Image: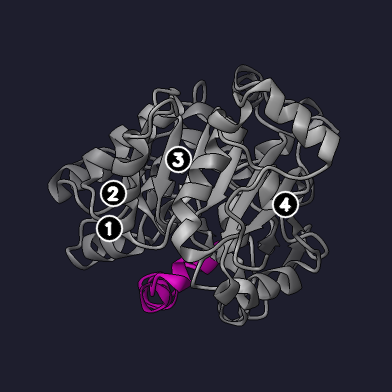
Amino acid sequence: MKFQDYDLNNQIKLALNDMGIYDPTKIQSKAIPRLLDRGKTHILGQAKTGTGKTLAFAIPITNQINPKHRYIQAVVLVPTRELCKQVYSVFTKLNKYRKLKAVEIYGGVSLEKQRKEIKAGAQIVIATPGRLMDLYRRKAISFRDVRFVVLDEADRMLDMGFLPDIQYILFDAMRGVYPRLLLFSATMLKQIRKIAHQFSNGESLVEINVSKDDLTVENCKQYYYRVKPDKKYSTFVSILRKERPKSAIIFVNTRRWADKLKKRLSQERGLRLRFNTLHGDKTQGQREYVLRSFREKKIDCLIATNVAARGLDIPHVTHIFNFDLPREGPEIYVHRIGRTSRMEHEGKAISLVTNEQMEVLNKIEDFMRKPIQRLSFDKVRTDRSKQSKSNQATSFNQNKKKIPIAMPASD
């Protein structure tokens, strides 16, 4: 079925057409029909990143909210300000003709302004847990008429320590309200299941899992290079010269190294790539500026910490580079590489792995139940290598010997 065949308000169908969206993804086709009914079915949805989970809950919520009632009917909880703005953007586009009022609530900006937006008749609230609790305790927001509560990227919220806030919002602030719970995540932790079962309280809880046997993006080709720690930077420069990425995210583990790497790469002659950074030390305004520049292709490579591992929906990303393998576990690796191959587009993920990190790589492969292909370091050529004299190339072919270059630690 296409979206035009769904029992949706015509205004939503028009908005989807304007967005160029006609066919539902797998998670959408399984979740939306269940949510369009008027029952009390709760949804526990698991799908790999980049498969359209936001529209899976935004479409039925938008379809069922009464535009005449100027009070909050849906609450969407998200882990970060970046994801908050993205989900808000989806609701805004979806409400192009329906004219529902959505507001975005997160820290770092004026609380009073957000209070006024809610008072002006907000019907959909997209919020980070901390700021939402702050507004609730100040009696600036009421949940008494909420029909839907969504936990988007629930695993990430638990990783960030939001479990107490989520429990308070669901089991204390919303006590006696009984909205439908729509819980979506790329990975399903035991604590997430426990929350869903406690909140459903005997009501029908439907689990939808469209990524059980495929934890990562099918169209993302994954590779790694074995490198010596002292050759890591020079190897990476060679890889960038070889790949010439049109749009890439380079993941590192620390904010300090993100800034240092940007400075060094920006000074590389002939690289001809534009770099900027995204990490927790930047203000909200700075982060929004960087993301906007990246989306508008004014930046070629975004050097980021795990703040960019989830929730960023930028379709044109062609490459993910793990300059550092994640220290937090295999799940973060899956989320990182999920920033490419969005909505069935092809992408490539390349990781740099030292001898000491091979155990980390093995855990990632075990988690995904698939191997990551190793690339030989001697195939990475710098521009200087490509411009070597023809007699060197002739000698190489005749003698069948490789031109000496720096080798990785394993070799």
The image shows residue 196 at horizontal and vertical percentages of: 60, 74
Q: CA distance from mark 4 to mark 2?
A: 28 Å
Instruction: For the residues labelled 3 and 1, say whether their Cβ atoms are less than 8 Å apart.
Output: no
Q: Secondary structure at mark 3?
A: helix
Label 3 neighbour load within 10 Å: few <14, some 14-19, many 20+: some
Residue 196 shows in the view: no
Q: Nearer the viewer, mark 4 or mark 3?
A: 4
Disc 1 or 4, which lies upstream in sequence?
Answer: 1
Q: Secondary structure at mark 4?
A: loop
Q: Residue type at mark 1?
A: Arg
Q: CA distance from mark 2 to mark 3?
A: 25 Å
Q: CA distance from mark 1 to mark 4?
A: 29 Å
Instruction: For the residues labelled 1 and 4, say whether their Cβ atoms are less than 8 Å apart.
Output: no
Magenta range is: 155-184
The residue depicted at 73 percent of the width and 69 percent of the height is 365
Q: CA distance from mark 4 to mark 3?
A: 35 Å
The vertical placement of 99 against 216, above or below, is above
Disc 4 or 2, which lies upstream in sequence?
Answer: 2
Q: Residue type at mark 4?
A: Leu
Disc assigned to residue 256: 1
Disc 2 or 3, which lies upstream in sequence?
Answer: 3
Disc assigned to residue 375: 4
Residue at mark 3: 86
Disc assigned to residue 259: 2
Quadrant (top left/top right/bottom left/bottom right) for the N terminus: top right
